Image (cartoon, helix red, strand yellow):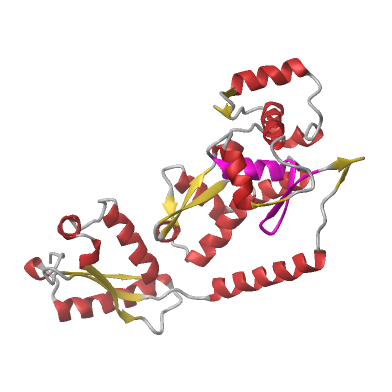
Protein backbone atom coordinates (compact mmCIF):
# COMPACT_ATOMS: atom_id res chain seq x y z
CA UNK A 1 0.00 0.00 0.00
CA UNK A 2 1.42 3.40 -0.94
CA UNK A 3 2.06 5.99 1.77
CA UNK A 4 -0.56 8.29 0.19
CA UNK A 5 -3.11 5.47 0.40
CA UNK A 6 -2.25 4.81 4.04
CA UNK A 7 -2.80 8.49 4.85
CA UNK A 8 -6.17 8.48 3.09
CA UNK A 9 -7.19 5.31 4.92
CA UNK A 10 -6.51 6.83 8.34
CA UNK A 11 -8.19 10.08 7.31
CA UNK A 12 -11.30 8.18 6.34
CA UNK A 13 -11.38 6.53 9.78
CA UNK A 14 -10.84 9.79 11.65
CA UNK A 15 -14.46 10.90 11.38
CA UNK A 16 -17.29 10.10 13.81
CA UNK A 17 -19.93 9.79 11.07
CA UNK A 18 -17.84 7.24 9.18
CA UNK A 19 -17.27 5.23 12.36
CA UNK A 20 -21.07 5.25 12.83
CA UNK A 21 -21.43 3.98 9.26
CA UNK A 22 -18.96 1.15 9.93
CA UNK A 23 -20.82 0.26 13.13
CA UNK A 24 -24.11 0.05 11.20
CA UNK A 25 -22.65 -2.00 8.33
CA UNK A 26 -21.26 -4.52 10.84
CA UNK A 27 -24.89 -5.62 11.37
CA UNK A 28 -25.85 -6.05 7.70
CA UNK A 29 -25.72 -4.36 4.30
CA UNK A 30 -27.95 -1.32 3.80
CA UNK A 31 -29.37 0.62 0.90
CA UNK A 32 -28.48 4.34 0.86
CA UNK A 33 -31.90 5.64 1.89
CA UNK A 34 -32.36 3.05 4.65
CA UNK A 35 -28.97 3.85 6.17
CA UNK A 36 -29.59 7.62 5.89
CA UNK A 37 -32.83 7.15 7.82
CA UNK A 38 -31.11 5.03 10.48
CA UNK A 39 -28.23 7.48 11.00
CA UNK A 40 -30.45 10.59 10.62
CA UNK A 41 -28.38 11.92 7.71
CA UNK A 42 -29.43 13.29 4.35
CA UNK A 43 -28.71 10.88 1.45
CA UNK A 44 -26.34 13.51 0.00
CA UNK A 45 -24.26 13.68 3.19
CA UNK A 46 -24.20 9.90 3.57
CA UNK A 47 -23.26 9.46 -0.09
CA UNK A 48 -20.31 11.85 0.38
CA UNK A 49 -18.94 9.81 3.31
CA UNK A 50 -19.53 6.46 1.59
CA UNK A 51 -17.66 7.65 -1.49
CA UNK A 52 -14.63 8.50 0.67
CA UNK A 53 -14.81 5.08 2.28
CA UNK A 54 -15.16 3.35 -1.10
CA UNK A 55 -12.04 5.09 -2.37
CA UNK A 56 -9.91 3.48 0.34
CA UNK A 57 -11.55 0.05 0.10
CA UNK A 58 -13.59 0.07 3.33
CA UNK A 59 -17.00 -0.42 1.70
CA UNK A 60 -18.38 -1.63 -1.61
CA UNK A 61 -21.69 -1.02 -3.35
CA UNK A 62 -23.89 -3.15 -5.56
CA UNK A 63 -27.05 -2.44 -7.52
CA UNK A 64 -30.24 -4.41 -6.81
CA UNK A 65 -33.19 -3.24 -8.91
CA UNK A 66 -34.08 0.22 -7.56
CA UNK A 67 -31.63 0.15 -4.66
CA UNK A 68 -27.91 0.67 -4.24
CA UNK A 69 -26.71 -1.51 -1.36
CA UNK A 70 -23.52 -0.97 0.65
CA UNK A 71 -21.50 -3.47 2.66
CA UNK A 72 -18.20 -3.58 4.54
CA UNK A 73 -15.18 -5.06 2.77
CA UNK A 74 -13.21 -7.34 5.09
CA UNK A 75 -9.88 -6.84 3.30
CA UNK A 76 -8.75 -3.67 5.10
CA UNK A 77 -10.21 -4.74 8.46
CA UNK A 78 -8.24 -7.99 8.38
CA UNK A 79 -4.90 -6.15 8.14
CA UNK A 80 -2.79 -5.50 11.20
CA UNK A 81 -1.43 -2.01 11.87
CA UNK A 82 2.05 -3.33 11.14
CA UNK A 83 0.99 -4.61 7.71
CA UNK A 84 -0.64 -1.30 6.84
CA UNK A 85 2.20 0.98 7.97
CA UNK A 86 5.15 -1.03 6.68
CA UNK A 87 3.66 -2.51 3.51
CA UNK A 88 4.98 0.38 1.40
CA UNK A 89 8.55 -0.80 1.83
CA UNK A 90 7.84 -4.19 0.29
CA UNK A 91 5.25 -3.34 -2.35
CA UNK A 92 6.24 -3.82 -5.98
CA UNK A 93 9.32 -5.83 -4.99
CA UNK A 94 9.85 -8.80 -7.31
CA UNK A 95 9.06 -12.14 -5.76
CA UNK A 96 12.50 -13.68 -6.15
CA UNK A 97 11.92 -16.69 -3.96
CA UNK A 98 10.32 -19.14 -6.39
CA UNK A 99 9.65 -21.65 -3.62
CA UNK A 100 7.73 -19.06 -1.64
CA UNK A 101 5.74 -18.02 -4.72
CA UNK A 102 4.90 -21.62 -5.61
CA UNK A 103 3.83 -22.34 -2.03
CA UNK A 104 1.49 -19.33 -2.02
CA UNK A 105 -0.08 -20.30 -5.35
CA UNK A 106 -0.56 -23.91 -4.26
CA UNK A 107 -2.10 -22.83 -0.94
CA UNK A 108 -4.44 -20.08 -2.10
CA UNK A 109 -5.28 -21.06 -5.68
CA UNK A 110 -7.29 -24.11 -6.71
CA UNK A 111 -7.81 -25.00 -10.37
CA UNK A 112 -6.55 -21.61 -11.48
CA UNK A 113 -8.88 -19.63 -9.19
CA UNK A 114 -8.24 -17.87 -5.88
CA UNK A 115 -9.89 -19.89 -3.13
CA UNK A 116 -9.10 -17.37 -0.39
CA UNK A 117 -7.30 -14.03 -0.12
CA UNK A 118 -4.38 -14.26 2.34
CA UNK A 119 -4.10 -11.64 5.08
CA UNK A 120 -0.34 -11.20 4.69
CA UNK A 121 0.52 -8.46 2.22
CA UNK A 122 3.42 -10.30 0.56
CA UNK A 123 1.25 -13.35 -0.15
CA UNK A 124 -1.57 -11.23 -1.57
CA UNK A 125 0.93 -9.52 -3.83
CA UNK A 126 1.92 -12.93 -5.30
CA UNK A 127 -1.71 -13.53 -6.30
CA UNK A 128 -2.11 -10.03 -7.74
CA UNK A 129 1.09 -10.47 -9.72
CA UNK A 130 -0.28 -13.76 -11.10
CA UNK A 131 -3.49 -12.04 -12.26
CA UNK A 132 -1.47 -9.19 -13.78
CA UNK A 133 0.14 -11.65 -16.22
CA UNK A 134 -3.21 -11.88 -18.05
CA UNK A 135 -3.03 -8.19 -18.96
CA UNK A 136 -1.11 -6.99 -22.00
CA UNK A 137 1.44 -4.21 -21.78
CA UNK A 138 0.61 -0.90 -23.50
CA UNK A 139 -3.05 -1.90 -23.92
CA UNK A 140 -5.87 0.30 -22.58
CA UNK A 141 -8.69 -1.69 -20.99
CA UNK A 142 -12.28 -0.73 -20.29
CA UNK A 143 -13.44 -1.40 -16.73
CA UNK A 144 -15.74 -4.18 -17.95
CA UNK A 145 -12.76 -5.88 -19.63
CA UNK A 146 -10.70 -5.65 -16.43
CA UNK A 147 -13.56 -7.12 -14.40
CA UNK A 148 -14.03 -9.98 -16.86
CA UNK A 149 -10.36 -10.99 -16.61
CA UNK A 150 -10.36 -10.73 -12.81
CA UNK A 151 -13.55 -12.80 -12.52
CA UNK A 152 -11.63 -15.63 -14.12
CA UNK A 153 -9.59 -15.71 -10.92
CA UNK A 154 -11.91 -14.35 -8.19
CA UNK A 155 -15.61 -13.48 -7.96
CA UNK A 156 -15.16 -10.21 -6.05
CA UNK A 157 -13.64 -8.36 -8.99
CA UNK A 158 -14.18 -4.93 -7.35
CA UNK A 159 -11.89 -5.78 -4.44
CA UNK A 160 -9.13 -7.16 -6.67
CA UNK A 161 -9.37 -4.24 -9.09
CA UNK A 162 -9.08 -1.76 -6.22
CA UNK A 163 -6.12 -3.65 -4.73
CA UNK A 164 -4.28 -3.61 -8.05
CA UNK A 165 -4.76 0.15 -8.30
CA UNK A 166 -3.78 0.61 -4.66
CA UNK A 167 -0.63 -1.49 -5.09
CA UNK A 168 0.42 0.45 -8.18
CA UNK A 169 0.11 -2.56 -10.48
CA UNK A 170 -2.46 -0.82 -12.68
CA UNK A 171 -3.33 2.80 -13.33
CA UNK A 172 -6.79 4.24 -13.86
CA UNK A 173 -7.76 7.28 -15.90
CA UNK A 174 -11.53 7.80 -15.71
CA UNK A 175 -12.89 4.36 -16.76
CA UNK A 176 -9.70 3.36 -18.62
CA UNK A 177 -7.16 0.98 -17.09
CA UNK A 178 -3.60 0.03 -18.00
CA UNK A 179 -1.00 -2.35 -16.68
CA UNK A 180 1.92 -0.48 -15.12
CA UNK A 181 5.23 -0.76 -16.96
CA UNK A 182 8.14 0.09 -14.72
CA UNK A 183 11.33 1.35 -16.27
CA UNK A 184 13.94 2.52 -13.75
CA UNK A 185 11.13 3.08 -11.28
CA UNK A 186 8.98 5.13 -13.67
CA UNK A 187 5.41 4.40 -14.68
CA UNK A 188 4.75 4.49 -18.41
CA UNK A 189 1.18 5.74 -18.60
CA UNK A 190 0.06 8.84 -20.49
CA UNK A 191 -2.26 11.19 -18.63
CA UNK A 192 -3.94 14.38 -19.69
CA UNK A 193 -3.65 16.46 -16.51
CA UNK A 194 -5.72 19.38 -17.79
CA UNK A 195 -8.59 17.09 -18.74
CA UNK A 196 -8.38 15.32 -15.37
CA UNK A 197 -8.49 18.65 -13.54
CA UNK A 198 -11.52 19.78 -15.53
CA UNK A 199 -13.36 16.53 -14.80
CA UNK A 200 -12.46 16.77 -11.12
CA UNK A 201 -13.77 20.33 -10.90
CA UNK A 202 -17.02 19.22 -12.52
CA UNK A 203 -17.41 16.33 -10.09
CA UNK A 204 -16.80 18.63 -7.11
CA UNK A 205 -19.43 21.05 -8.42
CA UNK A 206 -21.98 18.25 -8.84
CA UNK A 207 -21.23 17.03 -5.31
CA UNK A 208 -21.74 20.53 -3.94
CA UNK A 209 -25.09 20.93 -5.71
CA UNK A 210 -26.24 17.48 -4.60
CA UNK A 211 -25.29 18.21 -1.00
CA UNK A 212 -27.22 21.49 -1.01
CA UNK A 213 -30.39 19.85 -2.33
CA UNK A 214 -32.73 19.38 0.63
CA UNK A 215 -34.92 16.26 0.69
CA UNK A 216 -38.71 16.61 0.73
CA UNK A 217 -40.27 16.69 4.20
CA UNK A 218 -43.92 16.08 4.89
CA UNK A 219 -46.63 13.42 4.96
CA UNK A 220 -46.78 10.38 2.68
CA UNK A 221 -49.39 7.77 1.84
CA UNK A 222 -49.22 4.13 0.74
CA UNK A 223 -52.51 3.03 -0.84
CA UNK A 224 -53.62 -0.47 -1.80
CA UNK A 225 -55.46 -0.15 -5.12
CA UNK A 226 -57.21 -3.48 -4.57
CA UNK A 227 -59.12 -2.56 -1.39
CA UNK A 228 -58.52 1.18 -0.92
CA UNK A 229 -56.82 0.80 2.46
CA UNK A 230 -54.09 3.33 3.22
CA UNK A 231 -51.04 3.80 5.42
CA UNK A 232 -49.94 7.31 6.46
CA UNK A 233 -46.57 8.43 7.83
CA UNK A 234 -44.56 11.65 8.21
CA UNK A 235 -40.84 12.03 7.68
CA UNK A 236 -37.92 14.38 7.10
CA UNK A 237 -36.91 12.59 3.89
CA UNK A 238 -39.97 11.39 1.96
CA UNK A 239 -38.11 9.91 -1.07
CA UNK A 240 -35.86 8.04 1.38
CA UNK A 241 -38.91 6.90 3.36
CA UNK A 242 -40.54 5.60 0.14
CA UNK A 243 -37.43 3.58 -0.70
CA UNK A 244 -37.11 2.31 2.87
CA UNK A 245 -40.71 1.05 2.98
CA UNK A 246 -40.43 -0.54 -0.46
CA UNK A 247 -37.29 -2.30 0.70
CA UNK A 248 -38.96 -3.49 3.92
CA UNK A 249 -42.11 -4.67 2.13
CA UNK A 250 -40.07 -6.52 -0.45
CA UNK A 251 -38.20 -8.37 2.31
CA UNK A 252 -41.25 -8.94 4.54
CA UNK A 253 -40.10 -6.58 7.30
CA UNK A 254 -42.64 -3.73 7.35
CA UNK A 255 -43.98 -2.60 10.75
CA UNK A 256 -47.63 -3.00 9.68
CA UNK A 257 -48.47 -6.70 9.51
CA UNK A 258 -51.73 -6.00 7.64
CA UNK A 259 -49.98 -3.90 5.01
CA UNK A 260 -47.26 -6.53 4.66
CA UNK A 261 -49.91 -9.24 4.28
CA UNK A 262 -51.72 -7.37 1.48
CA UNK A 263 -48.39 -6.60 -0.23
CA UNK A 264 -47.57 -10.31 -0.24
CA UNK A 265 -51.07 -11.14 -1.45
CA UNK A 266 -51.61 -8.54 -4.20
CA UNK A 267 -48.04 -7.72 -5.24
CA UNK A 268 -46.12 -4.45 -5.53
CA UNK A 269 -48.00 -3.24 -8.64
CA UNK A 270 -51.18 -2.98 -6.55
CA UNK A 271 -49.77 -0.23 -4.34
CA UNK A 272 -49.36 3.51 -4.91
CA UNK A 273 -46.86 5.70 -3.03
CA UNK A 274 -47.84 9.36 -2.82
CA UNK A 275 -46.67 12.57 -1.15
CA UNK A 276 -49.80 14.06 0.47
CA UNK A 277 -48.32 17.37 1.62
CA UNK A 278 -44.84 18.84 1.71
CA UNK A 279 -43.64 20.84 4.70
CA UNK A 280 -42.75 24.16 3.11
CA UNK A 281 -41.14 26.05 6.02
CA UNK A 282 -39.39 23.49 8.24
CA UNK A 283 -37.94 24.59 11.55
CA UNK A 284 -34.18 24.37 11.95
CA UNK A 285 -34.47 22.96 15.47
CA UNK A 286 -34.99 19.19 15.33
CA UNK A 287 -37.47 19.09 18.20
CA UNK A 288 -39.59 21.86 16.67
CA UNK A 289 -39.36 20.19 13.25
CA UNK A 290 -40.65 16.89 14.63
CA UNK A 291 -43.56 18.77 16.22
CA UNK A 292 -44.37 20.34 12.84
CA UNK A 293 -44.37 16.97 11.12
CA UNK A 294 -46.46 15.37 13.85
CA UNK A 295 -49.05 18.15 13.57
CA UNK A 296 -49.15 17.77 9.79
CA UNK A 297 -49.57 14.01 10.15
CA UNK A 298 -52.46 14.43 12.61
CA UNK A 299 -54.20 16.72 10.10
CA UNK A 300 -54.16 13.98 7.45
CA UNK A 301 -55.10 11.24 9.92
CA UNK A 302 -58.19 13.23 10.87
CA UNK A 303 -58.99 13.88 7.22
CA UNK A 304 -58.56 10.35 5.81
CA UNK A 305 -59.15 8.21 8.93
CA UNK A 306 -56.89 5.30 7.80
CA UNK A 307 -57.93 3.04 10.68
CA UNK A 308 -59.27 -0.50 10.97
CA UNK A 309 -61.08 -1.53 7.75
CA UNK A 310 -60.26 1.82 6.09
CA UNK A 311 -56.54 1.59 6.58
CA UNK A 312 -53.51 -0.07 8.09
CA UNK A 313 -53.33 1.93 11.33
CA UNK A 314 -55.00 1.45 14.71
CA UNK A 315 -56.00 4.29 17.04
Q: For the magenta stretch, what is the residue range?
A: 156-180
- Relative to residue 3, is residue 238 depicted above or below? below
Q: In the displayed structure, does residue 164 sit left or right of residue 188?
A: left
Residue at point 66%, 41% (across, down) = 163
Taking the magenta stretch, the answer to whether it contains residue 174 is: yes
The answer to whether residue 57 shows anywhere in this view is no
Residue 242: % across, % down:
33, 66
Quarter of the rendering containing residue 39: bottom left
Residue 41: % across, % down:
47, 63
Q: In the displayed structure, does residue 77 sit left or right of residue 241?
A: right
Residue at point 74%, 36% (across, down) = 85
Q: In the displayed structure, does residue 70 sit left or right of residue 268?
A: right
Observer-nearest residue: 140 or 284? Answer: 140
Observer-nearest residue: 303 or 284? Answer: 303
Quarter of the rendering containing residue 287: bottom left
| Residue most extreme to the right | 184
Residue at point 44%, 62% (across, down) = 40
| Residue most extreme to the bottom | 280
Amino acid sequence: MKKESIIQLFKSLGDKTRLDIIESLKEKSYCLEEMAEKLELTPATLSFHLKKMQNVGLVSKSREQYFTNFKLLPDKFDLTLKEIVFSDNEQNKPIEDDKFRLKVLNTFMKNGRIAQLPKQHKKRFVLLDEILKRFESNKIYEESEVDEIIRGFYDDHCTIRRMMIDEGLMTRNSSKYQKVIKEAGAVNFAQNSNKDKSMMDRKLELKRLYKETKPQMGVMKIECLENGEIFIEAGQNIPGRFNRYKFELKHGAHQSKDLQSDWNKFGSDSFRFELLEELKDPESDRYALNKQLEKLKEKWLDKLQPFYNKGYLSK
